[in-house]
Amino acid sequence: MPEPTEVRSMFARIAGTYDGLNKTLSMGIDRRWRRAVIARAGELKGKRVVDLCCGTGDLSLLFAEQGALVIGADFTHEMVKLAPGKHAAKDPAMPAMFVQGDAQFLPLPDDSMDVATVAFGIRNVESTERCLMEMRRVLRPGGKAMILEFPPPSRGPAGQAFRLYFNQILPRIGGLVSGDKEAYRYLPRSVLAWPKPKVFAEKMRTAGFEDVGFKPMTAGIACLHWGTKPLGR
Ligand SMILES: C[S@@+](CC[C@H](N)C(=O)[O-])C[C@H]1O[C@@H](n2cnc3c(N)ncnc32)[C@H](O)[C@@H]1O
């Protein structure tokens, strides 16, 4: 796992090409994965949502479109500074604001959010446990944590095909388009080092979430995790 400063400078370097490459490399499926978070979140109108590691704000945008009041936070200025313009281009009145902030130390009060979410970001955070604890802290009792991640590919044929794509093809295309080979070599490495869904679900329970569950998507390429902050804590 690289140092946080290296992670930040890597995302700073690829910020300009991040959105386009995301769509190309996932063949547009990334949008479907983010939509699955919204579908699972329930009624969102007027709900307070914090989107951690929000990057250029794609998941924040989907929440705001549902009428949620969104705070997006990311520790890479070059990524998060692109989010407000994207939101304004859709609708200048979109109820979202963006801050530069670390997912392990959020500038938010205890029990203040209805939903805390991270899409493809927690894998990059120095301490997964610290990030989960911080999500639980800022959620109100009964509030929901929703996390999208790439689990390590399975040993089956679909997993093998994905491994090949992830290890060989994706770094080449990503490196070529972004001009940053290292960033797109880091992506498969970080996914292979990430825990399997069952193990991550256990981490969520250990961090104090209940009703923990997960749903693998697209032959297990991505996985949506969820959990609830218990009432009375
Ligand atoms: C793969 S991008 C995901 C961005 C966005 N959520 C999406 O779905 O496109 C990961 C993001 O995590 C951010 N990040 C990594 N570690 C972080 C931390 N400790 N605190 C806040 N953001 C962090 C990076 O700056 C980067 O923008």
Image (cartoon, rainbow, N blue to C red):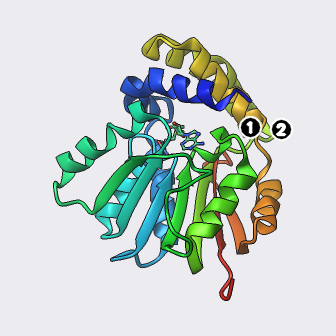
Q: Residue at x 18, y 55 (%)?
A: 91
Q: Are marks 2 and 1 in contact (CB under 8 Å)?
A: yes
Q: Residue at x 76, y 65 (%)?
A: 207
Q: Which mark is residue 159?
A: 1
| Viewer-nearest residue: 6 or 175 | 6
Residue 96 place in picture, x, y as percent: 31, 58
Q: How many marks?
A: 2
Residue 202 place in picture, x, y as percent: 82, 62
| Viewer-nearest residue: 96 or 30 | 96
Please determine whether, in this image, residue 21 is positioned above or below residue 103: above
Q: Which mark is residue 225?
A: none
- Quadrant placement of the C terminus: bottom right
Picture quarter containing residue 197?
bottom right
| Viewer-nearest residue: 211 or 167 | 211
How packed is label 1: few (under 14 Cα within 10 Å), some, or many (20 or more)? some
Q: Residue at x 49, y 63 (%)?
A: 108
Residue 190 place in picture, x, y as percent: 71, 32
Relative side of 135 to 81, left or right: right
Task: Check disc 1 and report its element: helix, strand or loop.
Answer: helix
> Marks 2/1: CA distance?
6 Å
Q: Amino acid at mark 1?
A: Gly
Task: Check disc 2 and report its element: helix, strand or loop.
Answer: loop
Q: Amino acid at mark 2?
A: Arg
Relative side of 36 to 47, left or right: right
Q: Which mark is residue 155?
A: 2
Relative side of 201 to 118, left or right: right
How packed is label 2: few (under 14 Cα within 10 Å), some, or many (20 or more)? few
- Quadrant placement of the N terminus: top right
Q: Residue at x 34, y 77 (%)?
A: 46
Residue 157 place in picture, x, y as percent: 77, 36
